Amino acid sequence: MEKRRRGKAAGAGGLSVVGALVEPLVLSRSERPCLMYYEVQTDAAGQGRSIQYLRFRNYYCAEIVVKRFVAGRAAEGEGSNEWRTVCSKQLMSDPNDEAEAQNWHVVDLGDAMARDGHSDLMRIYLVQPSMLWKRVELHSIQLFATDNPMASSRLRNNKARGGASPGGLGTSPRNALLDGMPRDEINESPADALMRSMSAFQTHLGASVALSGDDGGGGA
């Protein structure tokens, strides 16, 4: 088990890493096909923070389904507890082709983790119908949230309008979380790739202007 502590994620568009305990992969039996999932315990709800993004590197998983635990009301009894689906995401367009098998992904969880009260417990179910691959896993699992509801609202509104986020002009939170990852290991659309390139150019241009200003002000 690996405990990930909360901390600022460099270049992640105003988001910070959520402390989380990722349990080892659970398999319902020793051989596939079988049920496979990671159970993730977080400390977000206790801090009043809502998880918004999931980032990981794939390892031969064709699709994931994210679910959150919702506790039933005391009057309804323990049987009212349930796992509710947050979202699903296809990771490999062809489960039998390894071209996309080890890409990085960022999954937008929207506001689903905060519906019906914040949840500290989630599961990431792995789906792989192909029997070609011996191991099916996710690596480097991380969760991200904003530090306050107002920031979350602004980030959502900017994204909906296609505008700027705290990560830079025209940079979506998703692109900010992928910043620095090898481009041939990222599953992204051409539009996303273009936006990341523009953001990198703007960052470089800003640094160049700052450096030029420092040089000009240093003369006596």
Image (cartoon, rainbow, N blue to C red):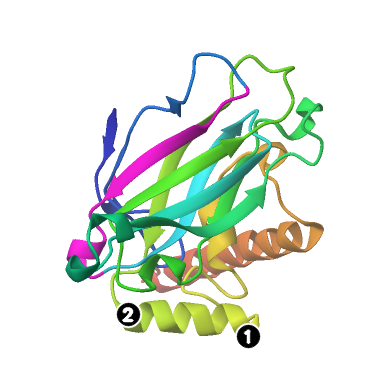
Query: In the rendered view of the protein, which quadrant contains the N terminus?
Result: top left
- Does any portion of residue 101 appear in the rendered image? yes
Asked whether, in this view, residue 97 is left or right of residue 182, the answer is: right
| Residue 107 higher or lower than 191, as above or below | above
Asked whether, in this view, residue 213 is left or right of residue 198, the answer is: left
Q: What kind of element bears circle 1? A: helix
Q: CA distance from mark 1 to mark 2?
A: 18 Å
User: Where residue 122 sits in the image (x, y, percent)?
Assistant: 38, 50
Q: Which mark is residue 149?
A: 2
User: How many C-alpha atoms fall within 10 Å of the one at disc 2: few (<14), some, or many (≥20)?
Assistant: few
What residue is drawn where x is 29% and y is 31%? 2
User: Where residue 171 sits in the image (x, y, percent)?
Assistant: 59, 69
Indicate which label's residue lies in the foreground, 1 or 2. Answer: 2
Which region of the structure is painted magenta?
Answer: 33-48
Residue denoted by label 1: 161
Image quadrant where residue 190 sits = bottom right
Do the CB atoms of the residues marked 1 and 2 lie less than 8 Å apart?
Answer: no
Q: Is residue 193 magenta?
A: no
Q: Amino acid at mark 2?
A: Pro
User: Where residue 95 sits in the image (x, y, percent)?
Assistant: 77, 32
User: Where residue 145 sits in the image (x, y, percent)?
Assistant: 37, 63
- Does any portion of residue 10 appear in the rendered image? no
Between 41 and 158, the one nearer to me in the picture: 41
Q: Is residue 43 magenta?
A: yes
Query: In the rendered view of the protein, which quadrant contains the C terminus?
Result: bottom left
Between 124 and 34, the one nearer to me in the picture: 34
Q: Amino acid at mark 1?
A: Arg
